[in-house]
Image (tube, rainbow, N blue to C red):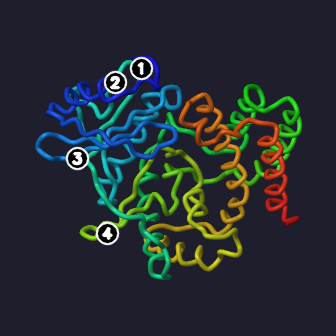
């Protein structure tokens, strides 16, 4: 199997059965995932599992193992995460042709709504504990969040392969201006392993066990504030009170540098560029094309340039 689009239950169920050393039923339920392929499967003993097939070319095997290592490090200090199962090959990663996969026990839950002040603090304490696990090791094969490296690479990739002729120069110009402006903010920062995509949708509530963190697919190395700002309902400082509550919980487990709050709008700009590069990687995928039919058009790139100019205004304080 060489092509991601060829994944079918007939092709992967026998491989999963062998990897789990468990007989599976014919139940296969696809779950929402833009970049990977994720399925709920069932064993004949009624146990449910989640099979995750990683998109080829996105992460190396070592990078995927960095994710799994982080999950096990979290579980070791009782942070509620779902760790991959060890397969019959003795590892947590299996292979289906060129496609890597992992299998997780199914853990149900509902999205946690952070509505009360106590809940904001509660999430802050969870994040503090997560970062304590994150600081214990490096993730050498994962992205290191920095505008002069990762963001510049994303921009170069987009300019070379995706941006339309009409907007290529203007897109590169505004991205370069953002990178040049924010790069000094990232000098001499503490960098640890992060969740990388820490928003409300990745925090589940389980009535029997409390909060649980999911979807470490975007884990990275970077400044801790990256895992704060995606939670905020508004831009900073309009969301200052929410951030204060998060930090109150966070500081029960580790220190936080207030000066890092200056990074929030820079990180937002970097996220916009990262997301565009992420989309570019899968723009030929049929499922992506049906969900984002306008992606890559002149109108699309014109809106990207407009949005980045606006974000630059927030970074510089002009807005």
Q: Secondary structure at mark 2?
A: strand
Q: Which numbered disc, 3 or 2, marks the residue that appears first in the sequence?
A: 3
Question: Where's residue 300, x and y in %?
Answer: 77, 42
User: Residue 165's spot in the image, x, y percent?
Assistant: 85, 29
User: Which sits earlier in the primary sequence, circle 3 or circle 4?
Assistant: 3
Q: Which residue is mark 4?
A: 210
- Give the distance between the C-alpha atoms of the residues marked 1 and 2, in whole angstroms: 7 Å
Residue 95: numbered disc: 2
Instruction: Return the residue at label 3.
Output: 48
Residue 197 in picture, x, y percent from top left = 53, 53
Instruction: Report the mark closest to the observer, 3 or 4.
Output: 3
Front position in the image: 238 or 4: 4
Question: Which comes sooner in the sequence, label 4 or label 1?
Answer: 1
Q: Nearer the viewer, mark 1 or mark 3?
A: 3
Residue 247's quadrant in the figure? Answer: bottom right
> Do labels 3 and 4 touch, CB within 8 Å?
no
Q: Residue at x 45, y 70 (%)?
A: 123
Q: Which class describes the residues within 10 Å of circle 4: few (<14), some (14-19), or many (20+)?
A: few
Of all residues, the one furthest to the left in this rendering is 45
């Amino acid at each position: 199997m060489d092509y991601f689009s060829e994944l079918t239950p007939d092709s992967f169920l026998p491989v999963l059965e062998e990897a789990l050393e468990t007989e599976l039923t014919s139940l296969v339920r696809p779950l929402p995932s833009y970049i990977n392929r994720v399925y709920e499967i069932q064993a004949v003993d009624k146990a449910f599992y989640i099979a995750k097939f990683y998109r080829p070319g996105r992460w190396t095997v070592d990078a995927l193992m960095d994710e799994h290592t982080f999950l096990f490090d979290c579980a070791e200090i009782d942070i509620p995460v779902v760790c991959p199962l060890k397969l019959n090959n003795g590892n947590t990663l299996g292979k289906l042709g060129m496609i890597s996969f992992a299998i997780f026990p199914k853990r149900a839950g509902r999205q946690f709504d952070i509505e009360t002040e106590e809940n904001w603090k509660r999430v802050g304490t969870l994040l503090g504990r997560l970062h304590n696990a994150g600081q214990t090791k490096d993730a050498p094969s994962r992205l290191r969040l920095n505008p002069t490296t990762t963001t510049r690479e994303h921009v170069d990739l987009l300019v070379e392969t995706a941006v339309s002729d009409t907007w290529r120069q203007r897109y590169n110009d505004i991205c370069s201006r953002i990178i040049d402006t924010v790069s000094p903010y990232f000098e001499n920062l503490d960098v640890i392993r992060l969740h990388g995509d820490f928003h409300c949708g990745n925090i589940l509530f389980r009535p029997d066990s409390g909060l649980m963190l999911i979807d470490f697919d975007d884990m990275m190395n970077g400044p801790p504030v990256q895992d704060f700002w995606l939670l905020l309902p508004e831009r900073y400082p309009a969301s200052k009170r929410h951030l204060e509550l998060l930090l109150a919980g966070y500081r029960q487990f580790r220190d936080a540098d207030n000066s890092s709050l200056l990074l929030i709008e820079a990180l937002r700009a970097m996220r916009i560029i990262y997301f565009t590069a992420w989309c570019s990687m899968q723009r030929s995928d049929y499922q992506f094309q049906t969900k984002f039919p306008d992606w890559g058009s002149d109108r699309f790139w014109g809106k990207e340039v407009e949005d980045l100019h606006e974000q630059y205004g927030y970074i510089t304080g002009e807005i």
